[in-house]
Image (tube, rainbow, N blue to C red):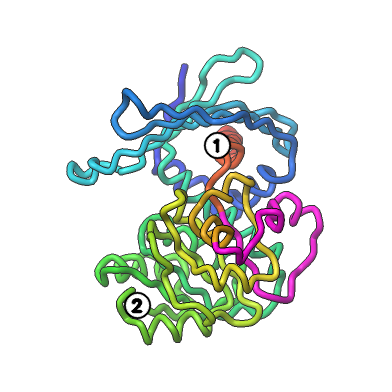
Amino acid sequence: MIRQITDAQVSQTLTPALAIESQKAAFTLPSEVPSRIILHQLVTDSTLFKPAAITTPSGNVHVGMKVVSVRPANAEIGLPTVPGTILMLDDTTGIVNSIISATLLTAIRTAAGSAIASLALRGKKSNAVLTVFGAGMQGVEHVRHLLHAFPIIKKVNIVNRTKPRAEAAIVKLKEEYPGQEYCCLLLSDNEGIKEAVSSSDIICLCTNSSTPLFPPNLLKPDAHVNGVGSYTPGMQEIGVEDIQSFEIVVVDSFGAKTVGDIAKAVEEGKFREEELVELKTVLEEEKVREGRTFFKSVGVASQDIAAAGFLIEALDSE
């Protein structure tokens, strides 16, 4: 019998603690991640098939595939513009045993990946101020996971194009994390953005922007930035000057080099692809950095299957 796992079950069971544990496994334990398959000629827009297998600390091998589509027109009919589903297989029989709604799971595993990158690069330094650009699902999950990883954070700035969505995000976050000070900022508030960025220890970029979200040369000398929103050569959340200023630029996979944030810096001769370091290497080194650091994530299939595997194990143990 095939089990259907909903977003509600994902939300209840895949806690920040469990999600972060799953992402450590995704980047450190044995995994097999073949090239993704993309359909884009006959289908509307594009559909991607991303298979992977990964071993979890329990010794289980989890095998699965995420199917994700890009359908911008879905917004007009109230559906997700990037719908996703994960199919999980029994490793012994090869038979599909679980179908998981992947929209929320993807946001959670992405935020958990940013959390472990932040921990690896910043350690337990003074992390008092967090600023997140984007008040959607991805932005909210980044706040949740960064607050779990860094309980010392006292202030959270949420920046968004529209105020109602940012305010709604803050209301939701206060229910789970009431001990922080929250500030809502509009993306058009130039002075407010400058003040927020220049005072932030950790910044998360969770938008689909095609231009940098803030002016250059505002970052603190030891600030850490997570970039997760851009995923094409034409998208860019952070400027070339800031890319050039980082002590280290870390990626979840070298495929991230094609994204505008990095590609434009390379094109302008301000950064070399050879300087990119994979997160797996950073986790193995266990070396906290003193200067500015940047983590660029475009998503790896092993992250999805690790999160799904941990989720299934947790549900089975209930």
- Label 2 neighbourhood size at 10 Å, few (<14), some (14-19), many (20+)? many
**Residue 308 circle label:** 1
Residue type marked 1: Ala
Choose between 290 and 64: the one closer to the eye: 290
Choose between 262 and 100: the one closer to the eye: 262
Q: Give above or below for 223 relative to 145.
A: below
Outermost residue to the top? 93
Choose between 147 and 299: the one closer to the eye: 299
Residue 245 visible? The answer is yes
> At 61% from the left edge and 66% from the top edge, which residue is drawn?
270
Whether residue 190 sits left or right of residue 241 in the image: it is left
SS label for mark 1? helix
Q: Quadrant of the C terminus?
A: top right
Residue 5 visible? The answer is no
Whether residue 158 sits left or right of residue 298 in the image: it is left
In the image, residue 272 lies in the stretch drawn in magenta: yes
Q: CA distance from mark 2 to mark 1?
A: 34 Å
* Residue stretch in magenta: 268-296
Residue type marked 2: Leu
> At 74% from the left edge and 35% from the top edge, which residue is drawn?
30
Q: Of the residues under marks 2 and 1, which one precedes in the sequence?
A: 2
Measured as percent of width and height from the top left, residue 105 is found at 47, 44
> At 30% from the left edge and 71% from the top edge, which residue is drawn?
167
- Label 1 neighbourhood size at 10 Å, few (<14), some (14-19), many (20+)? many
Choose between 197 and 172: the one closer to the eye: 197
Measured as percent of width and height from the top left, residue 198 is found at 52, 84
Measured as percent of width and height from the top left, residue 206 is found at 44, 60
Whether residue 80 sits left or right of residue 204 in the image: it is left
In which image quadrant can residue 140 be found? bottom left
Q: Give above or below for 298 relative to 53.
A: below
Q: Which residue is mark 2?
A: 185
In which image quadrant can residue 163 be found? bottom left
